[in-house]
Image: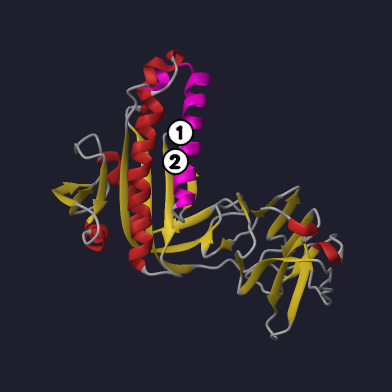
Amino acid sequence: MALENNKLPRLEWRDVGGCCHHVNVIERLYIGRVCQGVPADKRIIIRDVNVSRDHAVITCVGSALTIKDSSRNGTWVNSVRITSGGEQKLISGDFVHIGSTKLHVVFSEQSDHDNPNDIDLTETTRVLSRQETLTHLVADIRGFSTLVQQTESSLLFEALSQLYESLTNIVHENRGTVKDFAGDAIFAFWEHNDENDLVAVQHACHAALLQQQAATALFSNLPEKFSKLRHLELGWGIATGSVTVSHYGVRPENLALVGDSTNLAFRLSGLANKELSSTVVICHKTAKMVEQFMLVTPLGEVDTKGRTGKEVVFSIS
């Protein structure tokens, strides 16, 4: 983001009473329900028990504006959740959603301050539990346990760092959120709340196919020292369904997604490119939603570890 004509980035918003506010971002701007110890011109106070005491911070360094989430209930940029505890770039025109407040990123030559009063320092953050429809994407490395035994840890870490960076970028470019890196897997999800369900599913499926291409290109072009990893393979599982979205524990990164579709995505990733020859395996609900815009091939019924009954699954290309 270029700060043209010496203009400062600023945030504009309306409070619950409809009053307009704005504040310039000079170095750092803290957003939360309390932001204790932060000067009034460096903070935005949102009086909402769903907002954490210290919810997020926006940083301006040179020409770069970023927001970092440190909340328990989440921060959204343009309706896409930021990875819990993660950072994301902001540009002019972006909308940041925190609690029920929508903050607009714009440019300004003026400086004004919001001076909140009557802050309740004893009030605790109410952790939300919501029923949402999500599309889950899990990419799982094949034969990881054997690979760890046979490969020097520093080399494996170096290769996986490149892989996860590439796969993460693809998720973000397709409006998804990376939840976890679970050793040999990357877990991402797409929320359906603020857009057409089909759009979210389409983004997830497109991301999986792009990740497949990126992983193949990365492994095939590794230097000689990574020769044992050149034939590394992954399997992708995609599942769509209703889950409870909440939070475990006191750490902001402990986002909880609880539901059968979350578990199913992991189970399908374990079958992909292993028991099943297809690299990307999707559930029947996902298949029904994407069959109109991409090739969906039935793979039949499969058992999924720990779940009763059989699951009808498909591949995409």
Camera sees residue 51: yes
Task: Give the residue at the far front of this rendering.
Answer: 5
Indicate how the structure is coloured in the image.
secondary structure
Task: Give the residue at the far bottom of this rendering.
Answer: 17
Q: Quadrant of residue 193?
A: bottom left
Q: Which mark is residue 210?
A: none
Image coordinates of residue 291 in percent, x first then y, are: 21, 59
- Is 27 in the magenta? no
Q: Quadrant of residue 233?
A: top left
Q: Secondary structure at mark 1?
A: helix
Q: Which amino acid type is marked by label 2?
A: Leu
Where is 62 relative to 14, above or below? above
Which stretch appears magenta?
Answer: 147-173
Q: Which amino acid type is marked by label 1?
A: Leu
Q: Quadrant of residue 241?
A: bottom left
Q: Which residue is mark 1?
A: 163
Image coordinates of residue 17 in percent, x first then y, are: 70, 86
CA gap between label 1 and label 2 equals: 6 Å
Image coordinates of residue 25 in percent, x first then y, are: 77, 60
Q: Secondary structure at mark 2?
A: helix
Q: Which residue is mark 2?
A: 167
Q: Is residue 289 left or right of residue 232?
A: left
Q: Is residue 64 left or right of residue 134?
A: right
Where is 312 relative to 170, above or below? below
Badge 2 crowding class, 10 Å Cα cut-off, few under 14, some 14 to 19, many 20 or more, is many
Badge 1 crowding class, 10 Å Cα cut-off, few under 14, some 14 to 19, many 20 or more, is some
